[in-house]
Image (tube, rainbow, N blue to C red):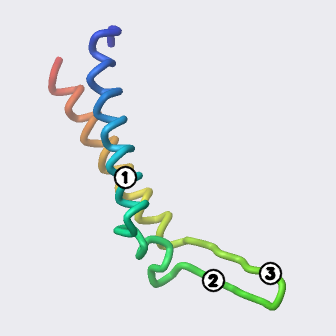
Amino acid sequence: MQGREVGPWLIVVGVLLVVAGLAAWSGALSWFGRLPGDIRIEGARSRVFIPITSMVLVSLVLSAVFSLVSWWFRTRR
């Protein structure tokens, strides 16, 4: 991949990060981290949060995205 081919990808990633940041800031992602299977333990002086389901969801989405990007690059040859 040459330098000119990387530029559009960096722009797309930047726009996606801005959209995700705006969604988090507006509260549209308030459900994230409160899914069934996310473990929260709150004591008198401590809190433990283990986001198992949320991280499985992130893993599935990222795997799908990277798989699609890989497929797209293979078909362009």
Q: Is residue 17 above or below residue 60?
A: above
Q: Is residue 51 above or below residue 42?
A: above
Q: Residue drawn at (44%, 71%), measured in percent from left and top?
A: 32
Amino acid, disc 1: Ala
Q: Which image quadrant for residue 18? A: top left
Amino acid, disc 2: Arg
2 displayed left or right of 74: right
Q: Residue drawn at (23%, 35%), measured in percent from left and top?
A: 71
Q: Are marks 3 and 2 in contact (CB under 8 Å)?
A: no
Amino acid, disc 3: Ser
Residue 20, numbered label: 1
Tell me how far mark 3 sits from mark 1, CA to CA: 30 Å
Give coordinates of residue 44: x percent, y percent. Answer: 81, 91
Check disc 2 and report the residue beneath it: 40
Give coordinates of residue 77: x percent, y percent. Answer: 17, 17
Give coordinates of residue 42: x percent, y percent. Answer: 71, 87
- Mark 3 or mark 2, earlier in chain: 2
